[in-house]
């Protein structure tokens, strides 16, 4: 056993090369079905970056449709990425069933307190990291 069944296994894929003759979402759906058979729990659906002639249509949530399609056609949990930078956008993706998880990176670089700001926006209270308690206002 390489990975314990008690731990979730995520696989990040590039769902599309965004290039003629390249890897497509159709192939990604088929790959996700195979990965599910091999006990993968979640597909993290990214895209691009594999070929120099890519033509990426970048915009808010531009990779979410990949997660949505893989989730629905391969019947596997998915994570959405790609210019998801506010709590309302993330909430809509989750509540509409387009993905099961939001994975963010650049927004956390811009705002390391994003979880605290998101909780405040939603009227929720979350615990601060113990190391930060003295900085709380």
Image: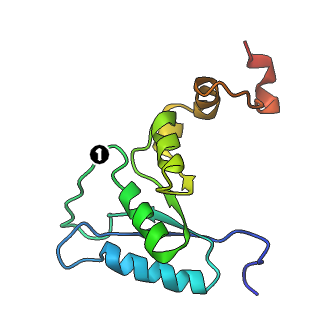
The residue most toward the front is 96
Q: Position of residue 45 (x, y in %)?
A: 45, 64
How many marks on residues? 1
- Please tell me which residue is depicted at 61% across the width and 86% down the height of the picture: 38
Q: Is residue 99 above or below residue 128?
A: below
Position of residue 47 measured from the top left corner of the image (x, y, whole percent): 36, 63
Q: Residue at x 18, y 67 (%)?
A: 53
> In the rendered view, does 43 fall on the left or right side of 47?
right
Rate crowding at label 1 as few (under 14), some (14 to 19) or many (20 or more) other CA atoms within 10 Å.
few
Direction top: furthest residue: 137
Residue 125 located left or right of residue 51 = right
Which residue bears the numbered disc 1? 59
Secondary structure found at label 1: loop
Q: Which quadrant is the N terminus positioned in?
A: bottom right
Using the rendered view, name the quadrant where residue 129 is placed. Answer: top right
**Picture colour scheme:** rainbow
Residue at 51% over, 86% down: 34
Q: Is residue 57 visible?
A: yes
Which quadrant is home to the C terminus?
top right
Q: Can you say whether 47 is above or below 22 in the image?
A: above
Can residue 86 be seen here? Answer: no
- Residue 37: percent from left, percent from top: 59, 86
Left or right of 93? Residue 23 is left
Q: Residue at x 57, y 54 (%)?
A: 101
Left or right, residue 40 beside residue 80: right
* Residue 89: % across, % down: 45, 39
As drawn, 39 above or below 95: below
């Amino acid at each position: 056993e390489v990975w314990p069944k008690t731990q979730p296994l995520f696989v990040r894929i590039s769902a599309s090369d965004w290039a003629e003759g390249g890897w497509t979402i159709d192939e990604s759906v088929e790959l996700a079905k195979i990965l599910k058979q091999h006990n993968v729990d979640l597909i993290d659906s990214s895209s691009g970056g594999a070929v120099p002639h890519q033509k990426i249509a970048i915009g808010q949530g531009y990779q979410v449709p990949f997660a949505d399609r893989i989730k629905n056609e391969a019947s596997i949990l998915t994570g959405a990425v790609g210019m998801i930078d506010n709590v309302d956008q993330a909430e809509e993706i989750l509540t509409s069933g387009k993905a099961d998880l939001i994975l963010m990176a650049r927004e956390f670089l811009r705002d390391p307190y994003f979880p605290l700001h998101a909780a405040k926006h939603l009227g929720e209270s979350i615990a601060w990291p113990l190391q930060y308690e003295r900085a709380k206002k």
